[in-house]
Image (cartoon, grey):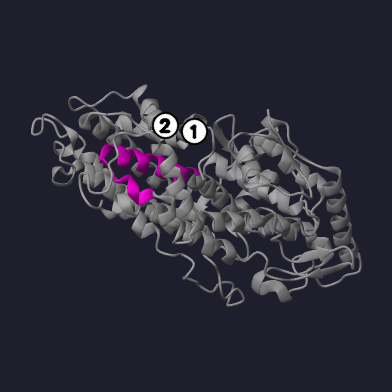
Amino acid sequence: MEKVIISSKGLSLEDVIKVARGKAIVSLDKESKKKINQSNELVNKLLKEKRVVYGVSTGFGKFADVVIDDKQSELLQRNLIISHAVGYGEALEEDVVRAMLVLRINSLSKGYSGIRLSTLEVMVEMLNKNVVPFIPCKGSLGASGDLVPLAHMALVLIGLGKAYYQGELMDGHLAMKKAGIETVNLQAKEGLALINGTQCMCALACLATYDALNLNKVADIVGALSFEAQNGIIDALQERLHKLRKQKGQIDSAYNLRMLLKASKNVSRQGELRVQDAYSLRCMPIVHGASKDGLNYIKEIVENEINAVTDNPLLFTDDQTAISGGNFHGQPLALALDHLKIVQAELANISERRIERLLNPSYSNLPAFLTSDGGICSGFMIAQYSAAALVSENKVLAHPASVDSIPTSAGQEDHVSMGTIAARQAYEIGKNVSRVLATEYLINCQGIDMRKDRGMGIGTNIAYKLLRKKIKTLKEDRELFYDLEYSQQLIDDGSLVKEVEKALGKALR
């Protein structure tokens, strides 16, 4: 089993995925433990000196001016967790919650939050023994941190709430007991340290960005199959043409398509069948490439946030001070995630148009809906309906969440990011995009069969054969749902990209 060590080097996006989905074993290095202990010592010093520090010796939000006696410190932190756990909706998926845990551990390990090492080690143990808190998906404003979802996560640490253990949902204290993990009595600053951060939206951002990077490569592979099925004009992919635009993503996408289609005898040259292709083929590198450029920017923002300290107040052991700031505000992620929504949605938009061109006999010069027995059979007619529905849903979800803000806490928290809403929407759009591309993948292979394959490209041939290992050419109507599920599985588990890159002998850009 893989291991991920939390250290000053930080975590990569791939590290987070290893923990979230691969269940890699997590541990803290010695330097992190030292910083954590030093930070906790400063909390104790602040209490002893009776300094007024937000969340340590005061209430929260509008109650920041209410000074709390240090004898009530434990009650203050416990009340913070139980009062803030007011989420609503379905549970976040296991990989999202595991990502939240590792991200919060990583942030707190930097040594600016005052939490005890023993408390962090309980969180590490929860990950390694796969105790997964039940966290409702709705309720975060994306500022003051992801207070609500993180509070639900913290409930399990103190023996409350609910959690999944060995596939069963149960009371939090029972899950911890069965896993052999001691629950925690929170000390000064610890409750605030656990919930003041962006780790819910960041967890969703990590998973959505990782998947989107895969989908962008898939879009090029599936788009190349569209060139095969539609006898696309290869001249439109020439390197010299795209270099004149000077957009890196466009140049990279055109490169991918050329590599995938190398040696293809199904593509055409300018003027052989037609002078120009429709935009969904001819402008494919420009559209896919713009998404590629957007993803590179988004990945940078997300990886910065993975290793960010987003608590408040932050403790600086070098000069023994505590400073209240706003690192918990989700605006950097909110804007990036709204961009991610659009970046992904556009891949589905152009994919659905390619589907339409292949199914419509006016464009394709093939039998309508790629069935040779039209009337009795519907072929792929309704598969396009479903893709169109997902594309339309994406357009609604792609409306920016970050342009909205509602003041909270009696006006003290008067601007919020709504970044967690953007994160949930980006995650959902990614699933829809995967299904649309899976639909095009399936339909393109049918189109290639009906067009009579004259010899496919190096990369497209592998993509075609991978699908055809299990899914046969459609001769008469059958339950396409299962074909689509398999097509999407090849996309989601990374098999399609992996096998194509193996055949090419190089990674797609």
Q: Quadrant of the N terminus?
A: top right
The residue lying toward the viewer, choosing from 312 and 352, is 352
- The answer to whether residue 47 is left or right of residue 181 is right
Residue in the picture at 22% in, 42% down: 358
Query: Residue 78 location, x and y as percent?
Result: 71, 55
Q: Which residues are magenta?
A: 214-237
* Camera sees residue 48: yes
The residue that appears at 40% across and 31% down in the rendered structure is 463
Label pair 2/1, CB-CB below 8 angstroms: yes
Q: Position of residue 112 (x, y in %)?
A: 79, 59
Q: Which residue matches tag 2?
A: 458
Tell whether position 52 is magenta.
Answer: no
Q: Give me the disc on residue 430.
A: none
The residue drawn where x is 86% and y is 47% is: 31
The number of callouts visible is 2
Mark 1 lies on a secondary structure that is helix
Amino acid type, callout 1:
Leu
Quadrant of the rendered image containing residue 410: bottom right
